[in-house]
Amino acid sequence: YGVTPGGFLWDCRVSAGLRMLQDTGHSVAEIADRCGFSNPFHFSRRVRARTGESPRAWRARVWAA
């Protein structure tokens, strides 16, 4: 599939986090914890790498649409 097992796991965790950002009102810290990230900063870095936006900015844009 062209991705390492670790990369696949991170992708799954970020995808789950983005779904939770879209579908719930949980804080970024709560979502990071529920998705298995060691801290909210690590989650935020992964989200920014995927979307180009911070989790809060991404959520605001998605909710506004």
Image (spheres, rainbow, N blue to C red):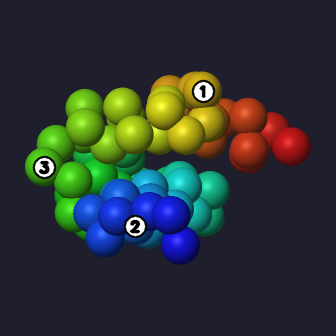
Q: Which one is earlier in the sequence, the residue at label 1 or at label 3?
A: 3
**Label 1 – label 3 distance at C-alpha:** 21 Å
Q: Secondary structure at mark 2?
A: helix
Could you tell me the amino acid type at mark 2?
A: Phe
Determine whether 22 is above or below 58 in the image. below
Report if residue 8 is visible in the image. yes
Name the residue located 35 percent from the left edge and 64 percent from the top edge: 4
Q: In x, y percent, where is residue 9?
A: 33, 68
Q: Which one is earlier in the sequence, the residue at label 2 or at label 3?
A: 2
**Label 2 – label 1 distance at C-alpha:** 19 Å
Q: Are marks 2 and 3 in contact (CB under 8 Å)?
A: no
Q: Quadrant of the C terminus?
A: top right
For this orientation, the residue located farthest to the front is: 2
Tag 2 residue: 8
Tag 3 residue: 38
Instruction: Judge left or right: residue 51 versus residue 9.
Output: right
**Label 2 – label 3 distance at C-alpha:** 17 Å
Tag 1 residue: 52
